[in-house]
Amino acid sequence: MTEETGTLPAVDGTPVAWRRRTGKGDGRPGLVFCGGFRSSMAGEKATFLDGVAADRGLEFLRFDYRGHGASGGAFTDLTLGDWIADALLVLDRLTEGPQILVGSSMGAWVAACAALARPGRVAGLVGIAAAPDFTEDLMLPALGEMGLARMRRNGFVDRPSAYGDGPYRITWRLIQEARSHLLLRGPVPFAGPVRLLHGMADPDVPWRQSLKLAEALTGPDVRLTLVKDGDHRLSRPQDLALLGQAVEEVISEVWNRRSG
């Protein structure tokens, strides 16, 4: 199996960078990785999944949203809707047949929105420290009244990062636009198999955010695995082993449904 790299123009012409590994072409669903907020397709989980795909002969696609990693665009000019559009762009243009979307943190929110937009293409979901609705449920309360007033006045606030890549500039436009993509205010009509992993020691996204997503999903095959000492990244060897197991379960379930 070979790996290709390239870019696709987004609707505004900005290049969206991608890496794609070909599979055996045996009918099994492919994998698409949706990264987290300010992350890239060169991260540990994306690299791990690329290795899984190479070992199993699976098609695997990873990409960077605009304003992230190797893609063009300025992070502060973009919103969640832009990043969902990027996921749909690569899904539509670079994959064929059923796909399993694997989303990390914000990427799980992006993946779920993409699944709702492409019900005929997305056959399963895997979420890692899923952060649906994090702009409304986590960011806004963390700002407090003074921070919110400053954001409205200046159009942004700078928030510290625990990962050495901050501070993050959070725009009021990002918060407002994300409100059109909130998922946890009602049912999430997705019937495919879903596996969610979340660390109970996650300091950034409480594990109950994944529980809320599990409750909102309408399909019967939804499982949440909690890792008591797991952090937000879930990138330790034992965490990655759980991720590999979750992906294998969803692949098997999708294959069984389609073949019989």
Image (tube, rainbow, N blue to C red):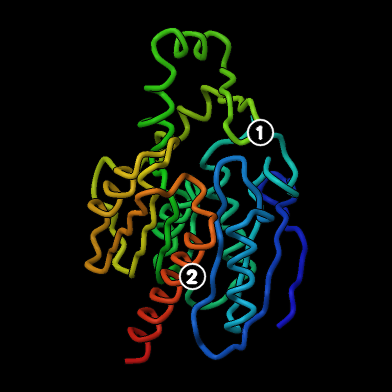
Q: Which residue is drawn at 61% across and 36% down?
A: 163
Coordinates of residue 102 in the picture (x, y in percent)? 49, 61
Q: Please give left or right for residue 14 compared with residue 122 in the image.
A: right
From what the image shows, is residue 50 above or below residue 156?
below
From what the image shows, is residue 253 above or below residue 119?
below
Coordinates of residue 131 in the picture (x, y in percent)? 42, 44
Q: Name the residue under label 2.
A: 244
Mark 2 nearby-residue class (10 Å; few <14, some 14–19, many ≥20)? some
Q: Distance between the residues labelled 2 and 1?
A: 27 Å
Q: Residue at x 33, y 84 (%)?
A: 257
Which circle's residue, 2 or 1, is located before the other in the chain? Answer: 1
Coordinates of residue 249 in the picture (x, y in percent)? 39, 75
Q: Which residue is drawn at 52% across and 42% down?
A: 81
Q: For the C terminus, give its image quadrant.
A: bottom left
Q: Nearer the viewer, residue 169 or 159?
A: 159
Mark 2 vs 1: CB contact within 8 A: no
Q: Name the residue under label 1.
A: 164
Q: Which residue is drawn at 58% across and 11% down?
A: 154
Marker disc for residue 68? none
Q: For the N terminus, give its image quadrant.
A: bottom right
- Circle count: 2
Considering the numbered disc 2 on the image, is that residue within a helix, a strand or a loop? helix
